[in-house]
Amino acid sequence: MKHLLIVYHSKSGSTGKMAEAVFQGTQHPDIDIDVRMRQAHEADIDDLLWANGLILGTPENFGYMSGMMKDFLERTFYPAEGKVEGLPYCIFISAANDGTGALSSLRRICSGYPFKEVQEPIISRGEITAELLAQCEEFGLFMAAGIESAIF
Ligand SMILES: Cc1cc2nc3c(=O)[nH]c(=O)nc-3n(C[C@H](O)[C@H](O)[C@H](O)COP(=O)(O)O)c2cc1C
């Protein structure tokens, strides 16, 4: 069975709501895949090496990804060297009004592993709406389906 890892950080809950919806999307009855959801501070190299696909979720803080997400990447970068090349991944972001700094900083580091981005990111700006959560579910479903069928 294929493995999908969701790593996210959320301080005040918005990215957490998005992560929950992404996870729900991966739980489609027709898709047989093992999904692990981890907060960034608890995720480690074993989780990363277990994964056939990766979804990263972060708030934008000070025009960058969250410190906890950066910490996860700092802890895993060298241990993962040469072992995760081309790992399919995608990004979702919760921001107040921007999100582009979080996106570019994450992409830059992910290109160093190097992971392969396989889906357009979701950037939420402001309130978490039902429409956004539905979009997050589709985002999770797309990723799970792609990993299960190895189309990426
Ligand atoms: C310390 C701090 C810095 C922030 N910096 C930005 C920023 O640079 N750009 C932005 O759009 N939102 C910024 N925000 C707003 C958060 O990105 C936004 O509230 C987000 O939804 C929080 O996600 P969370 O509820 O998962 O923690 C900042 C919030 C905090 C607490």
Image (cartoon, helix red, strand yellow):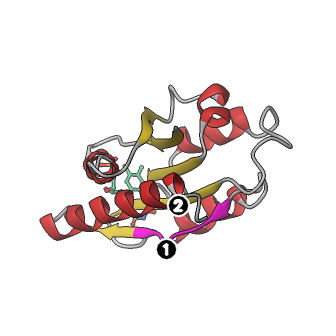
Query: Residue 104's x, y, as percent?
Result: 61, 68
Q: Which residue is mark 2?
A: 90
Please tell me how crowded label 2 is: few (under 14), some (14-19), or many (20+) other residues with Cα within 10 Å. Answer: many
Left or right: 39 with respect to 125?
Answer: right
Q: Give the Cα distance between marks 2 and 1.
A: 7 Å
What quarter of the picture does the C terminus occupy? bottom right
Q: Which corner quadrant of the image does residue 139 belong to?
A: bottom left
In the image, is residue 62 part of the stretch drawn in magenta? no
Within the displayed image, which quadrant is ligand 1 positioned in?
A: bottom left
Query: Residue 145's x, y, as percent?
Result: 43, 59
Q: Residue, x 30% and y 46% (percent of image)?
A: 27
Query: Residue 23's x, y, as percent?
Result: 32, 46
Q: Which residue is mark 1?
A: 120
Left or right: 2 with respect to 77?
Answer: left
Determine whether the residue tagged by mark 2 lies in a helix, strand or loop. Answer: strand
Q: Amino acid at mark 2?
A: Cys
Range shown magenta? 116-122
Ligand 1: does it lie within 8 Å of the C-beta at label 1? Answer: no
Q: Amino acid at mark 1?
A: Glu
Label at residue 44: none
Is mark 2 in CB contact (under 8 Å) with mark 1?
yes
Mark 2 or mark 1: whose residue is earlier in sequence: 2
Left or right: 54 with respect to 34?
Answer: right
